[in-house]
Amino acid sequence: MKRPSSERLCWIWLVALGASAAGAAEAMAPAVALRVNGRGPGAAVELWRGEPVIVEVTLQNPDRAAKDPILLEPPAGGWATRVTVLATSTGGRTSNWTFVAAGKPSGGALSLQPNATTTLVFRLQPADSTAPAKGHYDLVARLELADGKGWRGTARSEPAAVEVVDAPAEPKEAALGRRQLLRVTDALLAADLGRAEAAMKEMLAADVRRPEGFVAMGLISEAKGERELALVAIDLAIARAADPGTSATQPAAGAAAKERENAVPALKAKPVPLEYYDLRRRFEMMPPHEKPPRG
């Protein structure tokens, strides 16, 4: 039996080493996920034509035991410029939706530590929000790096199904709250404080008993650097979200109140959305508001 030459053995070893490195690079690709208007993959998210669309894209290092971080370092521009959000209609046709990154994304490299995450937020351009025809679409976030240092390749999120429909003429209660809170968030991402405050006031005027208006008030106070007001607002939102009653009036006093307690079983508090508590923790981390010195 003829033995392979030393040159052939060396070539086989190099091919195996290359395949192993390629497999390792593929295994170390960042995990990409996205949420549309606060909702992750699952049932189709209903989008109203003419209303904001906000997409959160999360990159994560999936290997908790990794010794080294995943490095994203393109030769020019920041790593965030290599993340895009694409919309495809039925049949896989790419739709002309323009998503822009909110705020000021990092202009440098990203070093994803083991089990660490980072999030980019995108807004659908206002001119595009009325353009999509009614129907089903899939949104996908894509990270593409073919050059630069560190990790190279393409990573995609699972598609998020959305259903574009006409907005109701007069949304009420929870539907109104969600729409207005989305408008407030979109305005804050666009650094349009006036538009955010107008949407918040409209929400409170429509139904002061609902929590969304106070969530909006907290977000606006955060944008202004008003920590104490932000905490008061989110506490009011939590209290209203948990209130099982439908009336905002004060309870009766004295004997009438006692008789009512005996006659009507106590109502259980409703579950408060977890994001309200996340917001409260975020507001707690804000630096205290410093009053300007008197002249």
Image (spheres, rainbow, N blue to C red):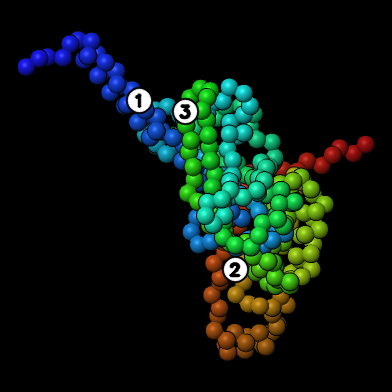
Count neighbours of disc 1 (C-alpha within 10 A) and say few if under 14, some if 14 to 19, many if 20 or more: few
Q: Position of residue 245 (x, y in %)?
A: 63, 77
- Per the image, the residue denoted by label 2 is 242
Q: Which mark is residue 286?
A: none
Q: Earlier in the sequence, mark 3 or mark 1?
A: 1
Instruction: Indicate left or right for 25 with 139 as reference.
Output: left
Helix, strand, or loop for circle 2? helix
- The answer to whether one can see residue 115 in this image is no
Q: Which mark is residue 151?
A: 3
- Above or below residue 211? Residue 144 is above
> What whole-number distance in Å separates the C-alpha atoms at marks 1 and 2?
53 Å
Helix, strand, or loop for circle 1? helix
- Comparing labels 1 and 2, the label whose residue is closer to the camera: 1
Q: Earlier in the sequence, mark 1 or mark 2?
A: 1
Amino acid type indicated by mark 1: Ala
Of residues 161 and 202, the one nearer the viewer is 161
> What whole-number distance in Å separates the C-alpha atoms at marks 3 and 1?
12 Å
Snapshot quadrant of residue 243: bottom right
- Per the image, the residue denoted by label 1 is 21
Helix, strand, or loop for circle 3? loop
Q: Position of residue 21 (x, y in %)?
A: 35, 25
Amino acid type indicated by mark 2: Ala
Q: Residue shown at 86%/37% (left/top)?
A: 293
Amino acid type indicated by mark 3: Trp
- Above or below residue 38? Residue 270 is below
Q: Position of residue 186 (x, y in %)?
A: 71, 51
- Comparing labels 3 and 2, the label whose residue is closer to the camera: 3
Please identify the residue farthest to the left as the structure is shown: 1
- Above or below residue 292? Residue 8 is above
Q: Quadrant of the N terminus?
A: top left
